[in-house]
Amino acid sequence: MKSDETTEESIVKQLLNTIDEHRLLKAEDKIVVAVSGGPDSVTLLHLLHRLKSRLGIEVYGAHLNHNIRGIDAQMDAQYVLNLCEELDIICFVKSMDVQTYAKEQQLTSEQAGRILRYEFFEEVLKKVGASKIAVGHNKNDQAETVLMRLLRGTGMQGLTAIQYKRDQVIRPLLDVSRGEIEAYCNDHNLAPRTDQTNLTSIYHRNKIRRELIPYLEENYNPSVLQSLVKTANILKEDYDYLEQEGEGRYKELVCFEKKDQVSFSIPALEKQHPAIKARILRRAGEELLGRGELLSYQQVQNLLGLLAKKATGKALHLPMNLEAFISYDKLIFTRGSKEDVESFKEELAVGEITYVHPLKASFELKVFSKDEVSKVSRDKFVKYFDYDKIKGKILVRNRREGDRFWPLGLSGKKKLKDFLIDCKVDRRERDLIPLICHEKDILWVVGYRISDKYKVTEETQRILSIRLVK
């Protein structure tokens, strides 16, 4: 700060420079400010409110009560509401049981709090039609985070620390020091709330803030904060490049995706550099859960260990009901444990389309004379049978113990279980495969093969067409 420049002038100038340099805001943006009640978020809310006309933006407040600090947490919420009322800012407040959620989802309290906060902020975004969430991290937070992660062990992502912008989240105060923020609060009589745990050295970050950094400044480098921030910014360029490469490889290698499942070819994954492989695995979790930074270093290492074993059926349970398992030559991620599939059996009628609820699909059955079928469909969900060999009811059901099947092209029967293993169908999916049956015979293992006994031959006069309609 220049000697002839006040603290307020300096902080406003730095805020505007950061917004401009990193393109954090544009005219007509609606901004939701995450307000904890502490000095950083209160200063950010106050500054953006004062500058809203100059920036051409609308400002809203949002506060989540984690229900961890009892009456103090309630007083924080009331302080935020009162401040927003004074500034004539619309404010949204919500209370959630973070610790219970953490236990249910197998997360740390810190992870759970972060997830619930950002889910709440996104709710507010949609409600007001906003485009950005502004949070109050400052320069000291940046430096402390780098040092804290370095001491406990981290990779490049950890050392890049806090980013100015990620998706909808922006951090306009990241180039402003904590001292400037505290001075600003005093100058404007904001009286922010103070978490008393921040005044002790019980916790790891607080010890770094109150003991280690002052020691380093006094004995090693008076500008240690600036040096740590500089290191984070240098590493960020390399990190961004690797992330870009990882995203590209992810898109190339993912071989099956649906709402609750992502899978990869194990041989293809094994060819990747470990740094890219780890990013692909993290990206799979993000795809299914809709959020990043969930899988820890150790969890990624556990996934790499699972991948190395290549043992079909081996699984790894991860946070938020995420599961990864090996199925033959595939690594599959799925969200939510698969429940046991109930047995089902429904009759199908010729000339009708029958909806089968457990499958969320329908079957259409039609009968033609041989002369009417001029071209055989190559769709694996449309098959043809000799209708004159079918004398009883036609049913669709899932598998039963002891099922046997006469696969097309074989000279005899085979256990259905062995057939599905040969086809490399994961055991979790076998009970969901529909079987079209005539009496006790399986006509068609849907999506795989028909029975040799009921195939169309030169002697066939009437053809039964069965089509799966999804």
Image (tube, grey):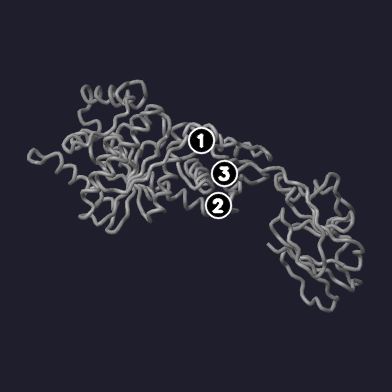
Residue 101: mark in rendering: 1
Dot 1 crowding, Cα within 10 Å, few <14, some 14–19, many 20+: some
Identify which residue, 199 or 391, lies in the foreground: 199
Q: In which quarter of the image is the N terminus?
A: top left
Q: In which quarter of the image is residue 346?
A: bottom right
Q: Nearer the viewer, mark 1 or mark 2?
A: 1
Q: Name the residue under label 2.
A: 253
- Viewer-nearest of discs 3 and 2: 2
Which residue is most to the bottom? 371
Q: Of the two numbered discs 1 and 3 on the same chain, state the one appearing first in sequence.
A: 1
Measure how far apart labels 1 and 3 are at the Cα level. Answer: 36 Å
- At label 3, counting other C-alpha atoms closer than 10 Å, the crowd grade (few under 14, some 14-19, many 20 or more) is few
Q: Where is residue 250 drawn, in percent x and y?
A: 51, 50
Which of pointers 1 and 2 lies earlier in the amino acid sequence? 1
Tag of residue 270: 3
Q: Who comes first in sequence, dot 3 or dot 2?
A: 2
Quadrant housing residue 266: top right
Q: Which amino acid does label 3 sit on?
A: Glu
